Image: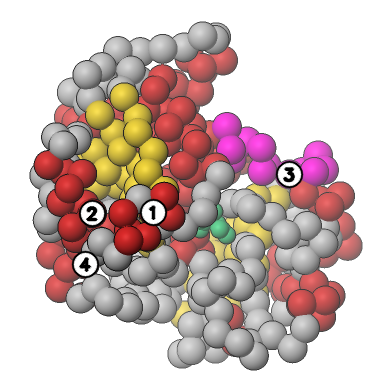
Amino acid sequence: MTLTLTNVSQQDVTAVSADSKHLLDVDSLTPEQIHKLRERASEFRQLRASRPFKSDSLRGGSIYTLFFENSTRTRVSFEHAGKALGADVINIAASTSSVSKGESLLNTVLTLDAMGIDALIVRHPHSGSPHFIARHVDAVVINAGDGAHGHPTQALLDVLTLQDHLGNLQGAKLALVGDILYSRVARSDIIAFRKMGVEISIAGPPTLLPQDWAPGENSLGVPDTEVTVHESVEDAIRDADAIMCLRLQLERQTSGLLPDVNEYSRVWGINAQRLALAKPGAPVMHPGPMNEGLEISTDIAHGSLSLVENQVENGVAMRMAVLEHYCGPTREIL
Ligand code: ASP
């Protein structure tokens, strides 16, 4: 799967991806760095359990969230995380900013940067936008989801959630089911979980897989991202230790990729019958928002094997770990 860059050059992506000042994708993190962020996030989760938890580690810092796409979990958890660490957090929705008057992405971020901000947390429908921004601002840039490309903090919180549940990720088998092609979570999850030694099984409609993928071994085109593509969801789930169910990214898909969404649910949806094929007790994850009854049945979404709420809780803890590291005085932890 290659980056689907729309109006941003590949040069922007490669120029800043390896710069550890920013968190633009999981590709540039080592397994050790992921472990350290995971450990720190676990500590934060425990600290948060004894409310009220408030730290001063980012006191005086200003964090701006700049979202050009809708969000509930990601934006709110970043805000929550920043405030718990003592930073001032300011939220900007593109729809209520001067973007709606025609201001360009570059002028928007240069304006914010001129206010002396410490971090810019960006979500944008165009792949590579955070990389482009990182080349032009002094602030730390954290990618909160760019097009179909990446969602690094989601992958980190998914690693935390599954590791907590399974105890050990090395050699575990994770089935990723659904819209692989347009899901930035799929791409970031594959990279992060492979770095943790997880075996990945894939199932989804052929029109929602990368074009060059066929049943069998495939990869994202970057090292150590091998996955096994299965023809049916049953084959992908069989004996899996966990299942990651992905939302149909209807807002990104071109038309005509699916004959019918009910048919999609019948052939690819995660339900109790299919889940029974996985290892006993195998949990189900979903990055949210869920389309219940479409990619996941309601009983599974809210059942005892669902880790969806754990993912949400871990989202705050992991974003605290990320903000502390990238914006705070403890950068040396990585
Ligand atoms: N919330 C995740 C994202 O922004 C997953 C999704 O929207 O399907 O990518």
* Image disc number at residue 94: 1
Assess disc 2: are there few (<14), some (14-19) or many (≥20) residues with their C-alpha within 10 Å of its C-alpha: some
Q: Position of residue 280 (x, y in %)?
A: 79, 49
Assess disc 1: are there few (<14), some (14-19) or many (≥20) residues with their C-alpha within 10 Å of its C-alpha: some
Determine the residue located farthest toward the front in the rendered image: 101
Q: Are marks 4 and 2 in contact (CB under 8 Å)?
A: no
Task: Report the residue marked by disc 2.
Answer: 108
Q: Are marks 1 and 4 in contact (CB under 8 Å)?
A: no
Task: Report the residue marked by disc 4.
Answer: 13
Query: Mark 1 or mark 4: which is in front?
Result: 1
Camera-side residue of 110 and 57: 110
Q: Are marks 3 and 4 in contact (CB under 8 Å)?
A: no
Q: Secondary structure at mark 1?
A: helix
Residue kind at label 4, given as amino acid type: Val
Measured Cα–Cα span from mark 4 to mark 2: 19 Å
Q: Residue at x 42, y 28 (%)?
A: 81
Q: Position of residue 244 (x, y in %)?
A: 63, 57
Task: Confirm whether the magenta stretch covers residue 220.
Answer: no
24 is higher (above) or lower (below) than 187: above
Measured Cα–Cα span from mark 2 to mark 3: 40 Å
Measured Cα–Cα span from mark 3 to mark 4: 35 Å
- The segment highlighted magenta reads 302-313
Q: Position of residue 10 (x, y in %)?
A: 21, 75
Earlier-in-chain disc, 4 versus 2: 4
Task: Confirm whether the magenta stretch covers residue 309.
Answer: yes
Measured Cα–Cα span from mark 3 to mark 1: 33 Å
Earlier-in-chain disc, 1 versus 4: 4
Residue kind at label 1, given as amino acid type: Ala
